[in-house]
Amino acid sequence: MTVACQGLGASVWYPCKDHQSDEPDKGASLTMTVPDTLTAVANGRIQFTKNNGDGTATTKWAVVNPISNYCLIPYIGKYVNFSEVYKGETGNLTLNYWVLDYNQAKAKNYMPEQVHKMLTAFEYWFGPYPFYEDGYQLFDASHSGMEHQSAVSYGNGYKFGYRGKDPSGFGWGLKF
């Protein structure tokens, strides 16, 4: 389970002051209680996970940077995690990959190389990744994907191009 709601706004799935330009200055947190057979993940860094002893678990995630409320996104499913440290322009950046358990082998062969290429190019052309304190997370998602400030959803089916197609029409779209 996840959501993608830019434009329409976060108020379609949780009560909030819903204006895209309004961001809490000191970050935000998301606390989720889910069946203990599932994993609840979100933006930023995990604060705690507690088994409630009733078949549920509660997990809290938080970001320290200002964030638009439509970017504060839950991901709930049978997720597994693998991680690494990327040597970025301003130091070590924690990279976490949260993938559905049945995609773990594909994800390990695909995601790190693509993320490294993307971060290298973006930091070269646009400057340092702006959320080092919150880390970088890439989430397996059922929709095509969306940036969610430190919690990027990925739903391209582990294919180059856009779902295996080249929208550019020139061959460049299948190179990444």
Image (tube, grey):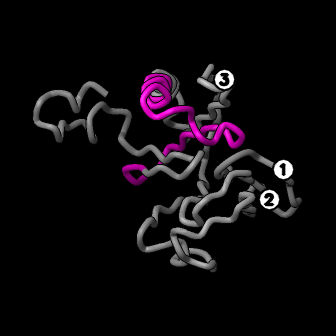
Residue 37 or 160: which is nearer the viewer? Answer: 160
Does 80 sit left or right of 104 as displayed?
Answer: right
Does 55 sit left or right of 120 as displayed?
Answer: right
Q: Earlier in the sequence, mark 3 or mark 1?
A: 1
Asked if residue 121 shows in the view, the reply is yes
Asked if residue 40 is positioned above or below residue 173 in the image, the reply reads below
Measuring from the top left, give residue 88's x and y in whole percent. Answer: 60, 23
| Residue bearing the label numbered 3 | 85
Q: Nearer the viewer, mark 2 or mark 1?
A: 1
- Over which residues does the magenta segment extend? 116-145
Q: Amino acid at mark 1?
A: Phe
| Residue bearing the label numbered 1 | 48
| Residue under the image location 51 percent in, 24 percent down | 112
| Residue under the image location 69 percent in, 65 percent down | 24
| Residue bearing the label numbered 2 | 58
Report if the CB atoms under discs 2 and 1 are less than 8 Å apart: yes
Q: Nearer the viewer, mark 2 or mark 3?
A: 3
Residue 116 or 125: which is nearer the viewer? Answer: 125
Q: Earlier in the sequence, mark 2 or mark 1?
A: 1
Element at label 1: strand
- Mark 3 nearby-residue class (10 Å; few <14, some 14–19, many ≥20): few
Measuring from the top left, give residue 44's x and y in whole percent. Answer: 68, 47
